[in-house]
Image (cartoon, helix red, strand yellow):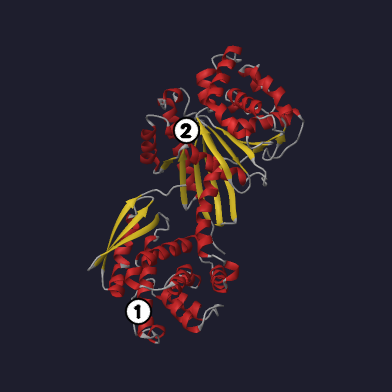
Amino acid sequence: METPQVLAAIDLGTNTFNLTFAEIKNKDEVHIKEKYKEMVRLGQGGISKAQISPEAFERGLNAMKKFKKIIEARGTNRVIAFATSAIRSAKNGKDFIKAVKEQTGIDIQVINGNEEAALIYQGIKHAVHLDKEEVLMIDIGGGSVEFIVGNANTAKLIRSVNVGAQRLLDGFVKSDPITENDLKNLKNHLKTELEDLLQEIQEFDIKMIVGSSGSFEALGQIIAHKQKKDITTINEFCFTPQDFKPVFQQIIKSDLHQRLHIPGMDKQRADMIVPGSILVDFVLSYLPTVKTLKVSHYALKEGIIYNYVEEHAAQLSEIYAQFEQNIRTKSVKMLSKKFGVHQHHALHVSHLAANLFNVLLPLHQYSHKEAELLKYGALLHEIGIFINRSGYHKHGQYIILHSGLAGFNSDEIIWLSNLVRYHRKSLPSLEHLHYNILSPDERDKVNRLSAILRLAVGLDYARRHIVNSVSADIKRDKVMLYLYANEIPDVEIDFVCQNATEHFKFAFNLDLKLEYEVKRSSL
């Protein structure tokens, strides 16, 4: 059985830092596991000044150190951390990112508002039932609020506006309970910031709002308690604008002590729920067609996970294109699963092999037939590990020769087995029976394609999946290969230089030199 990949996703929000673990077996088997959160309040005392205060800076660092310990104890294949409004808008945001890297080793990617909204959409659509009718999705964060209009298939409008609950709290809520004057000023601010957007949203005839994150979950819990509903999960809980109105009035007329005693109130949200509920009421005033509000338990942190899965699902779709119609692809996939091939690594190697095949086309001038067999060789290159890790390239050749792969003739099976045999260790040799029996032309193809496969395997040697693509500059006496990676591919380059350049020289009679550029892939 395939070993699941364990992904740790960190969402560094303005109020809360969230750590979520997911086990990923394939594109259709994603299991959200443990969740941890730290109420950091990174924006407190500084978000209106575009600054992370010293106290908040320290709280954030401590939270990330704690997360690091949990990640090490849990064990993961990959850690992804995304920073949102408080960090992207702070003058010392880069200082915080640098401090986290130095003290925990965790890299933080800063995403813009629209990227954040796109990830939230990914999270929501995997949590609640959506159909063909467009709904308005709202995520009220501490620094920004994301608005998405979409359905189960696509997002048709994505916006991010800096009217988050912490910003509104710091800027407009000067008393507790909030005064009529403060309430008026806050609503005027929302009108300035949101009126044009809400008028645009009116064109979609929205009947449902799906809300995610703290404020909506808190409102859902309060309304559920008020209705005496025993709910095991807040996800998919629905209420009406008429259910919301009396709760909203209770919230804005209460002081902190009174709000803390409202049944269902999340104590950590008792201050933020004031501007959060005001924003919900403001949005409803512009959208009289809304009949239902629904709570989504998934938001950005889950969106990070599903976005990661979908990026690799795209590779899966490319590699297994027209799967049901292609008996060769079907038989390779069945064989790889039968012998427990690690799909994620195999898919990434296949992606790199295809890329290398294309950029080196002027050297080999092979057709789609050779490209297809290279793809299958990449997908099966580790199949021999099922027998024994020692000499697994030889075991892989044996399995392919005796597996009865449907859709392949005997010559193609021998050719495919040779690609797997020579993706590591010794070079092709006439002393090896199943290489010797090939014609000189077929041997040349095996030499070159196995060299490409060996290079692709080397570029994902550490299984970090950081090399996204390659390009090549083919010169008279050498090939300059340029790697585009998410981070410095030092381990991969060292491995290639030690284990693949000799094979490349043997196959193409050219030296191989590698350079790289760190270039993070976009969402």
Q: Is residue 391 visible?
A: no
How many circles with numbers are drawn on the protein? 2
Q: Is residue 503 visible?
A: yes
Q: Position of residue 428 (x, y in %)?
A: 35, 78
Q: Is residue 388 above or below residue 97?
A: below
- Residue to which mark 2 is pinned: 85
Q: Secondary structure at mark 1?
A: helix
Residue at 57% x, 26% y is 195
In front of the other: 50 or 64? 50
* Three-letter code, disc 2: Ser
Q: Residue furthest right?
A: 228
- Residue to which mark 1 is pinned: 444
Q: Position of residue 280 (x, y in %)?
A: 63, 28
Circle 2 residues within 10 Å: few <14, some 14–19, many ≥20:
many
Q: Position of residue 513 (x, y in %)?
A: 26, 62
Q: Which mark is residue 339?
A: none
* Three-letter code, disc 1: Asp
